Amino acid sequence: MKKNISFSMQNIQIDQFAIMGDNIPTDGRIKTEIQIGADKQNRGVAIRSRVTYLNSDVNVILLIQVTCIFTIKEDDWKDLIIGEDKVSLPHGFLAHLAMHTFGTMRGILYCKTIDTPLGAVILPPTNVDKLVPQDFVM
């Protein structure tokens, strides 16, 4: 299988955004989730990321969910097809797309909180490699 997969980002969606507190406490925590989807007919891959900031009582302070939709170059998509109707997306490639999605979310979060009491919350570095499953077959 080819090591490099050419793709382009086609769409960015802000699925959810809510501020339910005045500050992010130092004793709070961050819950991070990721979902992956694919559209075989359109050579598309969707990465949905959700980050929830919680206080020490596990109440939601801030929630953001973003979906980035990517299209894979046709020749590269053909290399990902296995069998008659399955597609295998490699772990490293999915982690790369997740990294783009988290970077996009980081920018959205910064812009949406800059003039709020939260004062431009910065999404901390996230090891997306641990969030992405191994090869994703569909």
Image (cartoon, rainbow, N blue to C red):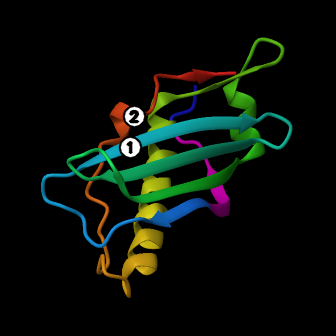
Residue placed most toward the observer, 102 or 3: 102
Instruction: Name the foreground residue: 75 vs 95.
Output: 95
Residue 33 at x, y percent in the picture: 44, 40
Residue extending farthest bottom? 115
State which quarter of the image contains the C terminus: top right
Q: Position of residue 52 (x, y in %)?
A: 39, 51
Q: Which residue is mark 2?
A: 131
Q: Which residue is rendered at x = 34% and y = 43% of the image?
A: 31
| In the image, residue 103 lies in the stretch drawn in magenta | no
Residue beneath the point at 44% across and 34% down: 92
Q: Quadrant of residue 82?
A: top right
Q: Is residue 26 left or right of residue 98?
A: left
Q: Residues within 10 Å of mark 2 (few under 14, many from 20)?
A: some
**20 relative to 51, above or below:** below
Question: Vertically, is 29 above or below 12?
Answer: above
Chief SS of the magenta region: strand
- Nearer-the-camera pick, 20 or 53: 20
Work out whether 110 lies above or below 115. Answer: above
The disc label shown at residue 65, or none: none
| Residue interval drawn in magenta | 4-14
Q: Quadrant of the N terminus?
A: top right
- The three-letter code of the residue at mark 1 reads Thr
Q: How far from the left and from the top, in percent, is residue 12?
A: 63, 63
Name the spot of residue 106 as percent of width and height, x first.
40, 65
Comes first in the chain, label 2 or label 1: 1
The numbered dot on residue 32 is 1
- Contact between marks 2 and 1 (CB within 8 A): the answer is yes
In three-dimensional space, the C-alpha distance between marks 2 and 1, rounded to whole angstroms, equals 8 Å
Residue that lies at the very extreme toward the top in this rendered image: 83
